[in-house]
Image (cartoon, rainbow, N blue to C red):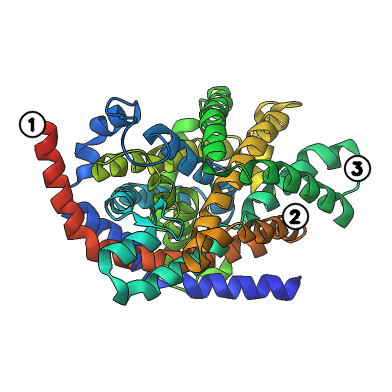
């Protein structure tokens, strides 16, 4: 186990160097400037599209704008917001949250461009069905010579879609919140039992395909976000005197990194501050997946013939996900003070904050949210993985991915959190390379599409 952990840590730090930071943040800024800050100018219009004002049931595609966003959100709102934020704060202190915000603001433009491209260049799989996603906009938009990028994305996409972090943190939550306090001894067999239950639940849903996944996600995700929202607001109201202090600390600590506890990151770029920026961007990417390429696969299935419209809906993802949900989690952890007086990490740290504010039942309420968030992510990721596999070896063989997926659930329930998060961080980095390169090259086509769309709206 220790060797596996060391190996995954090396893999993650190799992948997350300066080049990737430049590609994700520099690339995102380039897209933001190229679109003349479109995400901010068109924010109101994006909300109208999401509410269904422009929906047409006869448009090509499988699911509505709202269902496409909730399917994409069901994979991003989850452990990135509950465990990822806790990890960022326990390693980098309050300042890490500031860099997660930066990644989200830049990520809005990245999400807009990638999801617009997913509709502009939809391809057909071997069954002749319309599909969207980075592998299709690479082959359709850039041509055959660039197919190696599409293959690279699909290979890493199959691994990146494995639900290892979600399962690992769900197992940790069940152990720390339910089993251990009630005197149940946690062992390999109890972890395998948890994995077995998850395998059964996941199999029932993922074998039903995208329609079933999006139906379940569109019902579960909004209600869970609202419940989580209310619980965190209760924590903030109970500790209202602390909120301004910690909110300001997110800004003040962003440039001094006094809390940076993880020595291993410090030598990567320019000492402690560089490490803190890297940590925030990495956790931001894990939370909202902007530039990674998963969301365009969900948005590529939306019922629309207006690419820009889907891009606008997609860019709301980082706002809901990182700017709202992650900020609430961060403040809950900070105002309760649990981040300073416990060695807990991941979901357990968030649970400590809930327990501190609502003794006796707070952690159980969090457990409900964690369970739903995890399960909805489990369903969406399976869809992403099968899309990658069908691109590589044909749509008729994509069901083989489900066996790999189910195997990974058992693996994740029996390994450490750090091994799993490092593995996924590294894989996400290799998914971002083809996604961002293709998006930057195709960006001028999107800008032309924006102009055409504005003309159509006016007329």
Mark 3 surroundings within 10 Å by alpha-carbon count, few (fewer than 14), some (14 through 19), many (20 or more): few
Q: Nearer the viewer, mark 2 or mark 1?
A: 1
Q: Dividing the image into 4 quarters, which one contains the N terminus? A: bottom right
Q: CA distance from mark 2 to mark 3?
A: 17 Å
- Residue drawn where x is 39% and y is 45% of the image: 299
Q: Position of residue 19 (x, y in %)?
A: 37, 73
Q: Position of residue 87 (x, y in %)?
A: 58, 52
Q: CA distance from mark 2 to mark 1?
A: 55 Å
Q: Nearer the viewer, mark 3 or mark 1?
A: 1
Query: Which is more N-terminal, label 3 or label 2?
Result: 3
Q: Dividing the image into 4 quarters, which one contains the C terminus? A: top left
Identify the residue under disc 2: 413
In the displayed structure, 239 sits above or below 167; it is above
Residue 355 in view here: no
In the displayed structure, 304 sits above or below 44; it is below
Mark 1 surroundings within 10 Å by alpha-carbon count, few (fewer than 14), some (14 through 19), many (20 or more): few
Identify the residue under disc 3: 184
Q: Position of residue 204 (x, y in %)?
A: 69, 41
Query: Does dot 3 land on a helix, a strand or a loop?
Result: loop
Query: Does dot 1 land on a helix, a strand or a loop?
Result: loop
């Amino acid at each position: 186990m220790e060797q596996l952990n060391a190996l995954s840590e090396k893999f993650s730090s190799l992948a997350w160097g300066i080049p990737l930071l430049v590609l994700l943040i520099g690339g995102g800024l380039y897209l933001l400037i190229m679109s003349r800050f479109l995400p901010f100018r068109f924010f109101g219009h994006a909300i109208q599209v999401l509410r269904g004002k422009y929906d047409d049931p006869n448009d090509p595609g499988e699911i509505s704008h709202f269902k496409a966003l909730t399917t994409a959100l069901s994979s991003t709102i989850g452990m990135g917001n509950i465990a990822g934020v806790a990890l960022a704060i326990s390693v980098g202190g309050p300042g890490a949250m500031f860099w997660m915000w930066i990644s989200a603001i830049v990520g809005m433009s990245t999400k807009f461009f990638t999801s617009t491209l997913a509709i502009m260049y939809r391809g057909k799989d071997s069954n002749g069905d319309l599909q969207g996603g980075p592998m299709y906009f690479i082959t359709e938009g850039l041509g055959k010579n660039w197919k190696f990028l599409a293959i690279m994305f699909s290979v890493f996409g199959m691994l990146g879609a494995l639900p290892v972090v979600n399962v690992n943190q769900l197992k940790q939550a069940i152990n720390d919140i339910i089993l251990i306090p009630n005197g149940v001894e946690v062992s390999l067999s109890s972890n395998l039992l948890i994995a077995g239950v998850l395998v059964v639940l996941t199999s029932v849903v993922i074998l039903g395909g995208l329609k079933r996944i999006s139906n379940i996600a569109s019902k579960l995700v909004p209600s869970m976000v609202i419940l989580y929202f209310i619980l965190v607001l209760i924590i903030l109201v109970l500790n209202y005197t602390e909120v301004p202090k910690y909110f300001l600390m997110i800004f003040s600590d962003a440039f001094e990194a006094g809390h940076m506890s993880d020595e291993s990151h410090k030598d990567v770029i320019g000492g402690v501050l560089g490490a803190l920026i890297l940590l925030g961007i990495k956790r931001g990417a894990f939370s909202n997946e902007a530039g990674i390429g998963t969301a365009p696969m969900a948005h590529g299935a939306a019922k629309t013939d207006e690419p820009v419209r889907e891009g606008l809906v997609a860019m709301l993802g980082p706002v809901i996900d990182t700017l709202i949900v992650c900020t609430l989690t961060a403040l809950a952890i900070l105002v309760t003070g649990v981040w300073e007086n416990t060695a807990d990490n991941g979901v357990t740290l968030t649970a400590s904050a809930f327990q501190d504010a609502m003794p006796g039942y707070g952690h159980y309420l969090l457990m409900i949210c964690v369970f739903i968030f995890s399960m909805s992510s489990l369903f969406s990721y399976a869809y992403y993985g099968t899309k990658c596999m069908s691109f590589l070896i044909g749509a008729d063989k994509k069901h083989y991915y489900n066996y790999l997926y189910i195997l990974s659930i058992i693996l994740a329930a029996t390994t450490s959190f750090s091994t799993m998060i490092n593995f996924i961080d590294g894989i996400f980095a290799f998914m971002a390379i083809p996604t961002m390169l293709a998006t930057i090259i195709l960006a001028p086509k999107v800008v032309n599409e924006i102009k055409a769309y504005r003309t159509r709206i006016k007329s």
